[in-house]
Image (tube, helix red, strand yellow):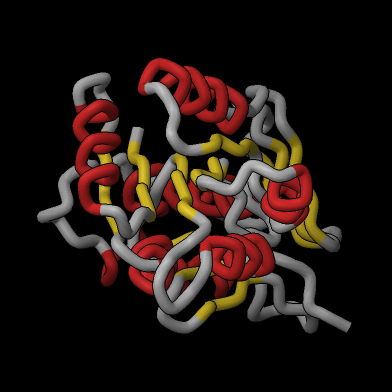
Amino acid sequence: MRILLVEDEKKLANAVSQGLNGNGYEVTIAGSGEEGFYLLHRQPFDLVLLDVMLPHRSGIEVLKDLRSGGFKMPVLILTSRDSIEDRVLGLDAGADDYLVKPFASPELLARVRALLRRGRVERPKNAKFQVSDLELDVASRIARRGSQLLDLTAREFSLLEYLLSNEGRVVSRDMLARDVWKETSRHTPLDNVIDVQIARLRKKIDDPFPEKLLHTVRGIGFVLRKEEE
């Protein structure tokens, strides 16, 4: 499981990273809110540990921007501020949990495990998805747009299923490489392959129809959603 730690205190960041690495997690450290925000748009993460007091861009600002951008991974706020008002501010901004510094390593690990369990949603094999007039039945392997059946390859079906299961959420090419292509090596870029498959899928689910559902978010990835009125 991949964790992004956004923390500008180097000693604390290194200590937390070592503790998490020792328990089987892969940790990437960002020393500022800007760096953390950039990494989240470039790499897939399963959990974010986010300090509030960060240089240039606060953790609350980063969190608000992530949630407004459709990022749904669990976020654990780390802060020395422990007032009720500060906790409410963090939770209202979209945090899933709140841990006050200084904290014990076992408590952090317990919070991480709980958030990762909560964020891991298993899709039933008989799942059905629908956005506007686009429908997909996983069990029967049938996709249709309105009354028209869509002739999809196995890869296109898996790609569409993933996009539909993340409806309204921007998914990056790294996420698609990891979760659809099952590619775990960072040294095997699939950007061109993914772009070709997206183009082919778009021709089948969007081009013949007036309402466009599959959108490209420049520099970030793709999102499947209804057009805004």
Relative horizontal placement of residue 112, taking residue 228 as reference (left or right) = left
Report the front residue among 9 and 140.
Answer: 9
Residue drawn at point x = 56 percent, y = 72 percent: 202
Relative horizontal placement of residue 188, taking residue 119 as reference (left or right) = left
Residue drawn at point x = 19 percent, y = 61 percent: 189
Q: Position of residue 173 (x, y in %)?
A: 38, 62
Toward the left, the furthest residue is: 187
Q: Is residue 185 above or below residue 106?
A: below
Report the front residue among 113 and 158.
Answer: 113
Q: Position of residue 32 (x, y in %)?
A: 36, 67
Q: Position of residue 49 (x, y in %)?
A: 45, 45
Q: Quadrant of residue 215?
A: bottom right
Report the front residue among 33 and 203.
Answer: 33
The quadrant in which the N terminus is found is top left
Residue 106 in sight here: yes
Q: Quadrant of residue 183?
A: top left
Q: Is residue 58 above or below residue 89?
A: below
Q: Position of residue 18 (x, y in %)?
A: 19, 32
